[in-house]
Image (tube, rainbow, N blue to C red):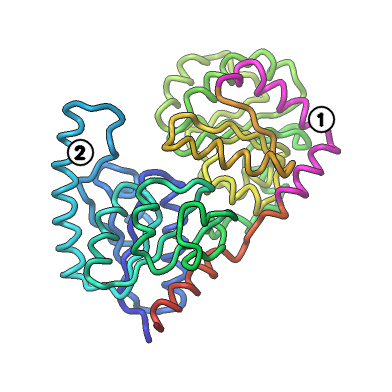
Amino acid sequence: MKLERVIISGGGTGGHIFPALAIANEIGKRYTGAEILFVGAQGRMEMEKVPAAGFKIIGLPVTGFPRKPGMKMLTFVVRLMKSNRLAKKIINQFKPQIAIGVGGFASGPLLRAAAKNGIPTLIQEQNSYAGITNKLLGKKAKTICVAYEKMERYFPKEKIVLTGNPVRENLLSQVDNKPEAINFFGLKNPDKVILIVGGSLGARSVNNAVLKNISLIAESDVEVIWQTGSIYYRDILDKMKDATPKNLHIHEFLSRMDLAYAAAGVVISRAGAGTISELCLVGKPAILVPSPNVAEDHQTKNAKALAEKSAAVLITDAEIDEKLLPEAIRLINDKETCKKLSENIKKLARPKATTHIVDEVEKLLNK
């Protein structure tokens, strides 16, 4: 059967959006002319990133479940009811053959509406610890694509397919092109480069740890590429003013992550599932700092899954001011440990994840 109409729902962070776009691009390659509709949450970053990638998106007014009782709970319920009605309307009008959920606020109402209409649904769970929404959606989903083993703790075993996480298509195109990376970032000491990324929006505690260790960076023989994130960039520039060391390169957002990875000898990062999948693919020694501000503390579980296999170094958010930069500088000077971390993290890579997921979409279509 030919796939003519598919809905992909979810978002909220780059960790959900980039896999969704990778899946959409693979579907577009296989089924020329297929209509792909995204459904996201109003006011979230998918409403900007998805149209920029050339796809149509509709926003639902859904918000996250409040952690404390109060007026926010009433707002949540009202918006959820509106989202459920709008999701039902979207399904009835668009008539998708398959609905794919990648996680995020919008995937709940949309996939529930699809399942109620008898439309097969596929969930792509990126983390080693499944969120509440996906656990609930998993009961009705036909297929659940996962990136980690032992996910039968959260989903029916017979529905699980171990695929890995989709990553950005262009990631490997320049990852070995160190000369271009050196030129792109203007590096003077390309043999010792530390890349710091806190996500597209940034990570306050990671940024603060860098600010508190500026003198250590300045006195070292390393070069640091620092993505601050859009929220913190201006404030950091104001704080640094004329005090920026020559070996520190400050960026709001890294549009060429392929070249950033090509340049990096060690990567400091949060432990979102998408980022970990990228690190596995490019095989970079990594120091993971799990965000404590995510649902069910899933980033810590992601990071532990790698640290237990000696595939990454885990430093908690509470200890990064003292440990993060000293450990990164120590690590980049320890070639033996870097080599071991690189070899071990590469073993966990699943470079064909996107292809495998769309294979599962085809199976559902042909059923």
Is 303 placed left or right of 95 in the picture?
A: right
* Image position of 13 with respect to 334: above or below: below
For this view, does 32 lie left or right of residue 171? left
Measured in 3D between alpha carbons, the distance from the residue under mark 1 to the one under mark 2, in whole angstroms, is: 50 Å
Q: Residues within 10 Å of mark 1 (few under 14, many from 20)?
A: some
Q: Secondary structure at mark 1?
A: loop
Q: Is residue 212 magenta?
A: no
Assign the magenta stretch its main secondary structure: helix
Residue 199 rendering spot, x and y as whole percentages: 49, 38
Q: Magenta part of the protein: which range? A: 318-345
* Quadrant holding the C terminus: bottom left
Q: Position of residue 42 (x, y in %)?
A: 24, 46
The amino acid on which the numbered mark 2 sits, given as a three-letter code, is Phe
Q: Report if residue 338 lies within the magenta region.
A: yes
Disc 1 residue type (three-letter): Asn
Quick one: which residue is furthest to the bottom in this view?
1
Give the residue pinned by disc 1: 333
Q: Residue at x 86, y 38 (%)?
A: 336
Which residue appears at 14% of the width and 63% of the height? 89
Residue 76 is marked as 2
Task: Pick the residue in front: 114 or 194.
Answer: 114
Earlier sequence position, callout 1 versus callout 2:
2
At horizontal 71% and vertical 20% (from top left) the residue drawn is 326
Q: Is residue 54 visible?
A: no
Q: Image height check: is 310 above or below 5?
A: above
